[in-house]
Amino acid sequence: MAHVSRAVHIDAPRERVFALVADPARIAELDPRVGGVRVERGASGPRRVHLEFAPGAAGSSAEIVADVTRYVAGRDFVMASPAGAPGPAFRLEVSCRDASGGTDLTCEMEIRLPGLAGRMADPLLGAALAQQVGALLARVEREATRKPVDDAATGRVSQSGPTDRAHSSTKTRKTN
């Protein structure tokens, strides 16, 4: 099993950081290996996440199913593959805590491919996972610390930057 744990301090409110990192529908934006995301929602938030995952350029895609096992708005988000689920086993744990005028964000991720080939791939998968988690934290920090820009024409306040998009859908799919 490949496992990575990283932490970063972000000079932004905890609620803003959490909103960026704990939205399962955004996973496809953050990882080029994820081709699509479908989120089943319950009364209190996301309940189950289906990820279409292609581990390599020539590899076939596999579905990763993960249940949201803990969701405390603004603080904790954990999702993990249920016991006995087919395909790769996956676990993501995100924690946001108030600290020194900002937020301490901790992210742990694990993935295990099935079979002997999966165990042999752990070192390479671990390196890729470390890169992915580092990129996730850097992107969250960038977006969370962006300054709002007043749009004088409309009177609205928006976040600056070309990547801003509304995310109202719970289904995300990449197009080539």
Image (spheres, helix red, strand yellow):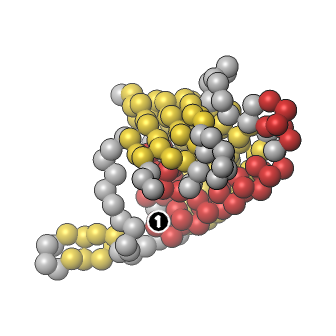
In this view, 53 is above or below 116: below
- Locate the C terminus and report the quarter of the image it occupies: bottom left
Does residue 71 show up? yes
How many numbered marks does the figure carry? 1
Name the image quarter holding the N terminus. top right
Q: Is residue 104 visible?
A: no
For image coordinates 85% across by 32% down, the residue present is 116
Which residue bears the numbered disc 1?
Answer: 144
Give the percent coordinates (x, y) of residue 32. Answer: 56, 55
Mark 1 element type: helix
Q: Amino acid at mark 1?
A: Ala
Q: Quadrant of residue 103?
A: bottom right
State the image coordinates of residue 51 (x, y, percent, origin top left): 53, 39
Closer to the camera, 25 or 141?
25
Q: Is residue 66 above or below residue 164?
A: above
Assess disc 1: are there few (<14), some (14-19) or many (≥20) residues with their C-alpha within 10 Å of its C-alpha. Answer: many
* Image location of residue 71, percent across then percent down: 50, 36
Between 31 and 24, the residue placed more toward the observer is 31
The residue at 64%/53% (across/down) is 57
Residue toward you, 124 or 91: 124
Residue lying furthest front: 58
| Residue lying farthest to the bottom in this orientation | 152
Relative side of 135 to 159, left or right: right
Is residue 167 found left or right of 81 in the rendered image? left
